[in-house]
Amino acid sequence: MTFKTTLNKELEKYHLILGSTSPRRRQILAENFGITNFATIASNFPEDLAKSNVTPLAYVSLTSSKKAEAIYDTHRNTLEEKTLILTCDTIVTSNGKIFEKPMTKSEQAKFFEYFRAHGDVEVISAITVFKVENGKVSEYRDHAITKLSFRTDNDDIVNAYIESGEGLEVAGGFKYQQLGCLLFDSISGDYYNVVGLPTNTYTLLCKAVK
């Protein structure tokens, strides 16, 4: 199947780099956006920015930008003349608190206890595009916020989910696209933002190639 939109045609003029090795992001880019001609390069940015005195949105936006900057700085001497570097960073927040990737089941359980106490969970993604052309670098940014409502009557599901080990080493401790959807009553916003790459990424790429 071919999907020849104006963006697809314009992207033929560029070398597109997805600054991520996430299989979900690669899949969304190819299967949901119809963009298949891209390379993947992991960013070496340590993602260790301070979270105090900064909003979750500001934190994730700066992290995404720093990821793109790190790829550019590392590969600037070997980049093709016309290159696009696409990066994304996603965090999970509740009551203004940022939840990283739990490494143990006990840590994951504490996440869920907090979600139950406060109810609302937000998944925030920041996307960045560095456009390298004619020796100049332009930066484009956008973000997406999806709201989830954590179930309060789900002891059986929570316990089974923790024991399954599915949500370990994932932001917020759950994979909504798999068993993790059972932890929530509702979703408001972009589903693909929760999975890994928001749909407004497509619009941001359109702006970058104009």
Image (cartoon, rainbow, N blue to C red):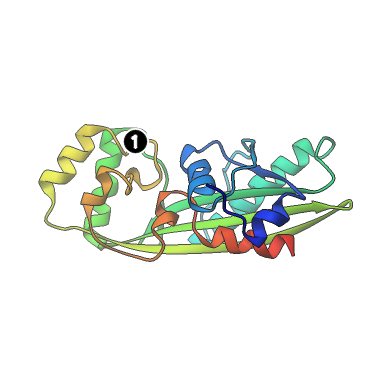
In the image: residue 56, left or right of residue 106: right
> Is residue 123 depicted above or below 76 in this figure?
below
Pinpoint residue 42: horizontal percent, then vertical percent: 61, 35
Pinpoint residue 50: horizontal percent, then vertical percent: 55, 50
Residue at the front extreme?
1
> Is residue 126 depicted above or below 102 in this figure?
below
Tell me the residue at 22%/33% (across/down): 164
Pinpoint residue 122: horizontal percent, then vertical percent: 38, 60
Tell me the residue at 22%/56% (across/down): 116
Classify residue 143 by image quadrant. Answer: bottom right
Q: Which residue is at the front of the view, 14 or 176?
A: 14
Residue at the right extreme?
134
Q: Which residue is at the front of the view, 94 or 53?
A: 94
Tell me the residue at 61%/48% (across/down): 87
Element under disc 1: loop
State how many labels appear.
1
Tell me the residue at 77%/36% (across/down): 75
In the image: residue 165, left or right of residue 64: left
The answer to whether one can see residue 54 in this image is no
The residue singled out by tag 1 in the image is: 168
Q: Which residue is at the front of the view, 75 or 70?
A: 75
Pinpoint residue 45: horizontal percent, then vertical percent: 63, 40
The answer to whether one can see residue 106 in this image is yes
Tag 1: amino acid: Leu
> Is residue 141 depicted above or below 91 in this figure?
below
Q: Residues within 10 Å of mark 1 (few under 14, many from 20)?
A: some
In the image: residue 154, left or right of residue 162: left
- Point out the image quarter for the C terminus: bottom right
Classify residue 147 by image quadrant. Answer: bottom left
